[in-house]
Image (cartoon, rainbow, N blue to C red):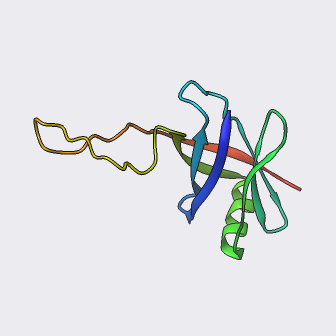
Amino acid sequence: MVDSVEISRVNIRDTVSFDISVWMNNPDDWEFRPSLSVSGQNFIISDINDGSQMASIELNDEQMETIQRDRAAELRVKFQVQGMHGRLKIIHPIIADGKAKKLATANWKTTQPVRFD
C-alpha cells in the first residue's frame, strides 16, 4: 500500500511532466494506481481504488495551458520503501572498490490521461 506521494518537480517537455516520489510500506507492495485530475489551478493525484487524494500541486498559467491542450500528463515515478531507502547513517563500503553500497530504486515513466473537474 502507498504510504505517501510527494510531487518534487513540474516541467514542460512535450507535455507537462511531474517528478514524483512514491513511498511504499514494504517491498512487496505493488498497489499504486494513480488517477490524475485538475480542479481549478490544482493538479491532483488520487488513488484509483478508493478515490483518496494522495498529492496535489498548484499549476501556473503556462502549465495549465499545456495540460488543457494535451489532456494528458507524464509521470516520472521513483518508488521507495520505508525502512529501506532514505539517509544512510552508517556507510558500508564495498571492499573491492572502496565505494559505498546504494540500494536500488525502481523508476517508472508513464503518460496518463487527465480528468478536468
Picture quadrant of residue 50: top right
Residue sitting nearer the eye, 87 or 78? 87
Q: Is residue 56 left or right of residue 89?
A: right
Residue closer to the observer: 89 or 27:
89
Residue 77 at x, y = what percent?
55, 45
Q: In the picture shown, does residue 47 fall above or below 43?
A: above
23 or 89, nearer to the observer: 89
Question: In the figure, 31 relative to 113: above or below?
Answer: above
Question: Which residue is found at the position 67% from the left and 29% from the top?
Answer: 31
Q: Which residue in the rendered view is the most extreme toward the bottom?
A: 61
**Residue 88, x across and y down, in percent:** 37, 48
Residue lying at the far top in this picture: please name it.
28
Looking at the image, can residue 16 be seen? no
Q: How many marks?
A: 0
What's the residue at 59%, 48% (across, down)?
A: 75
Q: Residue furthest left?
A: 96
Quadrant of the drawing holding the C terminus: bottom right
Side (left or right) of 100 relative to 45: left
Percent position of residue 52, x then y: 82, 44
* Quarter-of-image position of residue 47: top right
Q: Is residue 30 above or below residue 89?
A: above
Q: Is residue 62 visible?
A: yes
Q: Residue at x 10, y 35 (%)?
A: 96
Q: Name the residue furthest right.
A: 117
Q: Quadrant of the N terminus?
A: top right
Residue 72 place in picture, x, y as percent: 69, 51
Front in this rendered view, residue 40 or 78: 78
What residue is shown at x 70% (from left), y 60% (from top)? Answer: 67
